[in-house]
Amino acid sequence: MKKSSYIALAIGAGVVGYLATVYAVDQGDKKLHQKYLSQANLVKVDPLSQQAFKIFNQKGCQYCHTTNSEMPFYANLPVAKQLMAHDVKKALRQFNITALMDQVQQNKPISQVELAKLESVLDDGAMPPKQYLLMHWRSDLSPQETDVLLKWVKEERAKYYADPQVVAEYKYDAVQPISTTFKVDEGKVKLGEELYHDKRLSGNNTVACSTCHSLTGGGVDHLKTSTGINGAKGPINAPTVFNSVFNIHQFWDGRAKDLQEQAGGPPMNPIEMGAGSWQHIIDKLDKDSALKAQFTALYPKQGISEYSITNAIAEFEKTLVTPNSRFDKFLKGDKTALTQQEQEGYALFKANKCQTCHSGQAMGGLSFEVMGLKGDYFGDRGHITEVDNGRFNVTKDGNDMHRFKVPTLRNVALTAPYFHDASATTLEQAVNDMALYQVGVKLSQSDIEKITAYLKTLTGEYKGQQLQ
């Protein structure tokens, strides 16, 4: 037999083997998808959401992008096992849809960030990856299926997040004006404001909440790391207190579930306010008859206590929202609110996927994302510290290493320096670094200037006065 014949036979055998493998994979996937779909509870789910859920399931999205999916038979085969483990780890770092799949079945609002991420990959045609499609022919999204998912994203936004005052052009954008007001007890707000500025919450009466989160300075102290009791320096940059009520959790690593739990942290931290104990604080406040009367009236059961102190501060912080930025006015139809450069900056902001994580009214605070998704941020910076672990310090989940709560972009022009480590001293540097390490794009100087100009339009009002 000629050499060419052997080559032809080998190629033919290879093709047959490949097609047989693809067929086996396809049949295995089909059975698993049918099983998963039969276990899903979609009875109360609207037809469009049902379609979206079925597409996610049929395309195998749950294999790599959820933490609780039953894996196909080939996931345990040699080589395939290692490849899939690598792919799943990478996929979960970027987009975990476990909550999304659960929320669809429970007929609950989908996270604005998850909607934005889905929209982003659909617009780019980035999912499913081409490598995945080599063995999963049925998983390629048709134009019709892509349209269904994009329509679903829009309807979810319209149902839960769209502001009726926003003009049609921006109605379905991932970013919306600040319009939410939070129900509060005005008496507790007044007490909380007093406590927020009260240095008696610290061990030696020198540090208040407002020391590191100044309401006249963008809600921050403009230091790389804050200065606490006795001149002690903290390990991480202080985030703004403005619009923190929108955050899903508090602190960069999300260790506090809400504002009240966050308010209890600094007084007991030995290098922040160093009060030593709540009893020490209570004893000092108890000597203030006027303040004690407020506590008695507002908290007749608790009086002055850890609970009442942190609850009042949290009630006050619910009011620290900053609506009516120039950008908000622009979204509502005032075309003169933004210059041409600023409008081009917003277009670039969206084109470079910034709104994927900086979505919602606060433009941040809704998710935890990996710092250095598209580049080795910490390798380039050097000198790793414990706080650089981010969310991992709370969850101990390896998938959360270097993951941080996305900061709000509201009033961002007033909150330098930037990032958890304050490594960006200017807004321009922050824009450049975010594009490089999070998106994998090297922006031109012109684009940096336009996006920066746009970000400066996000400064809002507090108590009817524009922040400065």
Image (spheres, helix red, strand yellow):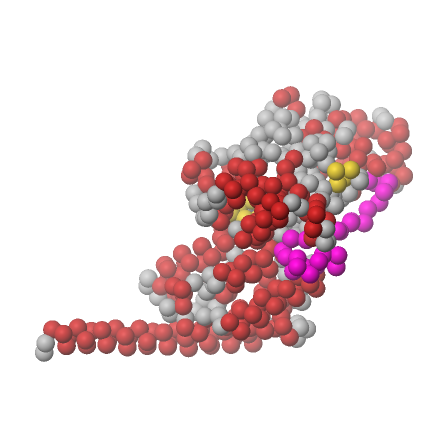
Residue 440 seen from this side: yes
Q: Main secondary structure of the magenta part?
A: loop
What residue lies at 59% left-to-right and 26% top-to-bottom?
233
Residue 233 drawn in magenta? no
Relative to 10, say whether 298 is above or below.
above
The N terminus lies in which quarter of the figure?
bottom left
Vertical position of residue 137 compared to residue 153: above or below: below
- Relative to residue 86, is residue 61 drawn left or right? right
User: What residue is drawn where x is 66% and y is 43%?
Assistant: 457
Q: Nearer the viewer, residue 46 or 272?
A: 46
Task: Describe residue 128's horizontal placement relative to residue 421 as left or right.
Answer: left
143 vs 285, nearest the viewer: 143
Is there any visible trace of residue 178 in the rendered image?
no
Residue 391 % position (x, y): 55, 45
Residue 441 horizontal side relative to residue 108, left or right? left
Q: Is residue 433 above or below residue 81?
A: above
Q: Is residue 421 above or below residue 55?
A: above
Q: Position of residue 34 (x, y in %)?
A: 51, 76
Question: In the picture, residue 47 is in which quadrant?
Answer: bottom right
Q: Residue at x 71, y 44 (%)?
A: 325
Q: Residue furthest left?
A: 1
- Image coordinates for residue 249, horizontal then vertical, percent: 65, 47
Residue 189 location in percent, x, y?
A: 82, 40
Give the mark count: 0
Q: Where are the magenta residues, as a range?
A: 162-189
Residue at the spot x=73%, y=33% of the render?
215
* Quadrant of the image containing the C terminus: top right
Find residue 44 and report its image quarter: bottom right
